[in-house]
Image (spheres, coloured by chain):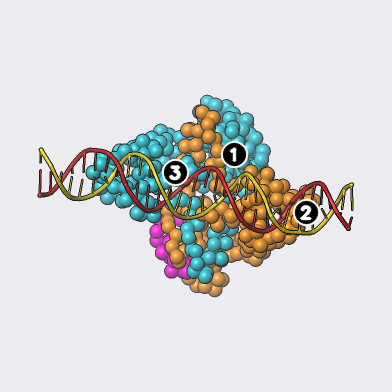
Chain colours: A cyan, B orange, C yellow, D red
Amino acid sequence: MTIQNRIARLLSYKHLLNRFKSLGLVRVFSDNIADPLGISASLVRKDFGLFGISGSQKGGYSIEDVLHKINNILGSNEVNRVIIIGVGRIGEALMSYNGFHKDGIKIVAGFDIDVKKIKKTGDVPVKPIEDINEYVKENNISVAIMAVPDIAAQQTLEILKRANIRGILNFTPVKFKSTDDITVNNFNIENELVNLIYFVNNFKKNGKEAKRVSNNI
Amino acid sequence: MTIQNRIARLLSYKHLLNRFKSLGLVRVFSDNIADPLGISASLVRKDFGLFGISGSQKGGYSIEDVLHKINNILGSNEVNRVIIIGVGRIGEALMSYNGFHKDGIKIVAGFDIDVKKIKKTGDVPVKPIEDINEYVKENNISVAIMAVPDIAAQQTLEILKRANIRGILNFTPVKFKSTDDITVNNFNIENELVNLIYFVNNFKKNGKEAKRVSNNI
DNA sequence: TTTTTAATGTTACATGAATAACAACAAAAA
DNA sequence: TTTTTGTTGTTATTCATGTAACATTAAAAA
């Protein structure tokens, strides 16, 4: 959990610093970052320290420098190639979304079991699932998005394991545990909705607690 | 955070108990639940205790009883009506997904600014965004899914606030903070991918740490 | 040149969540 | 009937995360 949050914060720092930069700012102090995010300045400095990001005693941090270092840490300076398994509505939506590149992420191919979905041309080709092992090997893919129907989830997990995929963003409602071989990030929409509904029904009404339900900062 | 996790666990308990039930089981002990989820049995008992779920000293917990109580707590015994703002690819995908009902969630309408999207017939009607205030009031809606393009996110937030929506599941990459009036759950796909890529690149390779990146248990 | 200032970097502390340990006790066994 | 057993419910402990405090120091001011 600890590193998890730290990486999430790094992303928040990045987005905030990009906003500062677009306003023409060049340097920031730790509390300029902490305040808008609702965290303490010492946590910002600690995070920076842990990732080897340093500032100057009186002049704070260089935005450009911090951004460059964060992007390095997150790997956003390279291109991270990701594939999608299951080209249904969700899969298609992700394939056509073009906001990933700013974080160094590129959807390079889709895979589907249904031959009607196969598409050799276009920005992102859709290939038959049988081709996955070869493709992953040749293109050195390590992360996949699973967007298949829940009934195919377990089977797809096995396929991805065999193809040597190391990380899965799992959009199916089936929950998988990470193992030493493969890291699974379960992205469960139902759960988030149930959670939100619970909060709205139980806390907001009476005005008590009302704290953030948000995943991210 | 604390309640958050507790509700997420409640959902895990529910899903696991449903599996047990479908296998014909009638009663369980706390460690039958804890072990598959990778948590301690005392945490399961503590969660149950906090929500007023009790078992019997020697015979454990009645699956049926626990399920009923969990569904009550989560509100899954009623129907929770939810609307979607933005009927693009993601919005459409969610509208046509029919796995929500098992958690007591029903998508009852979509709203869009584009007149070409308006659709009066069909399972889930799509209405012009101007109708939202009236619809929310008449149908007593408190939760909305935001699936608009990022450029429209801020404006949509204002619209939802004016319509007295209390909870938002935000699919845009724009991060919103919860306030006393409105709870926002930021569901940011880029962030999750960056996180996953970071883990796979930095931990899995060397075999160290490898812990779960998953949101949920 | 010396002093003051104001920020970083780091250490100590507080808070909270999960685990471990245990007390209570109902059911089963003797 | 008494003893044993095994599970719940609860208390104590551990561990980790974020905050607060502070020591350090480079720059500015005097």
* Residue A89, x across and y down, in percent: 56, 48
Name the residue carrying label 3. Answer: A6
- Count of numbered circles in the view: 3
Q: Nearer the viewer, residue B193 or B49?
A: B49
Residue at left 46%, top 45%?
A5
Q: Which residues are magenta?
A: B148-166
* Residue A165, x across and y down, in percent: 56, 33
Left or right, B147 with reference to A14: right
Q: Disc number at residue A112?
A: none
Whether B160 is among the magenta residues is yes
Chain ID of residue with mark 2: B
Q: Secondary structure at mark 2?
A: loop
Q: Amino acid at mark 2?
A: Lys
Is label 2 or label 3 in front? 2
* Residue B75, x across and y down, in percent: 63, 63
Name the residue carrying label 2. Answer: B58
Residue A11 visible: no
Chain ID of residue with mark 3: A
* Residue A181, x across and y down, in percent: 59, 32
Name the residue carrying label 1. Answer: A178
Q: Are marks 2 and 3 in contact (CB under 8 Å)?
A: no
Q: Label 1: how many residues lie within 10 Å, few (<14), some (14-19) or many (20+)? A: some
Q: Amino acid at mark 3?
A: Arg
Measure the alpha-carbon separation of dots 2 and 3: 44 Å
Q: Secondary structure at mark 1?
A: loop
Query: Is the residue A179 above or below the residue B174 in the image?
Result: above
